[in-house]
Image: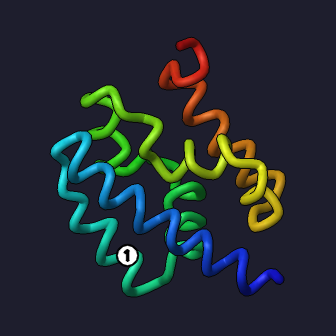
Amino acid sequence: MALNLEKSFDEAMLDIYRRAKSEAKYNATRFLEMLHTHGGLETARILINDTRQSDGYTELYLRGKLDLTVEAVVIDNPKWHSLFTKDELEKARKRLADNGYFSK
C-alpha cells in the first residue's frame, strides 16, 4: 500500500511539472531533474525542508500559481499527509501561509 501511495505521489509531482508548463508557462527544468534523480517523495522532502523557498516556488508565486507548488499539493490533499512528518507538513503549511495562499 505504501509503495502504491509513493508511486501515486510521484505521478502527482510529474503532474504539477506538466501543469506549471501549460498553465503558468513555467518550465521547471531543475524540478524535473530532481524528480528523475530523487523521485517525487524525496524531491518534495528536499524542497519542503530547505530553509529557503525554491526559485521555482518563487516563480509560481509571481505567476499566481501557488496551487502548483509541492507544498500546496502536499497540504491540499490529505492522502499524502502520511508520507510526511508533522514537522514537514507544518513547514509546508507555514510557507504557503507566509505567501498568502490560504487568504484567497
Q: Which residue is denoted by mark 1 in the rendering?
A: 34
- Bin the neighbour count of mark 1 within 10 Å (Cα to Cα): few under 14, some 14-19, many 20 and up: some
Quarter of the image containing the N terminus? bottom right
Decide: is 89 above or below 104. below
Report the side of 43 relative to 20 (left or right). Answer: right
The residue under the point 60% across, 66% down is: 45
Residue 72 x/y as whole percent: 56, 42
Q: Tag 1: residue type?
A: Met
Where is residue 80 drawn, in percent x and y?
72, 59
Foreground pick, 19 / 42: 19
Q: Quadrant of residue 76?
A: top right
Compared with 102, 65 (above or below) is below
Placement of 90 over or under 6, stated as above or below? above
Give me the residue at 72% from left, 75% from top.
Answer: 5
**Image colouring:** rainbow
Asked if residue 5 lies left or right of residue 32, the reply is right
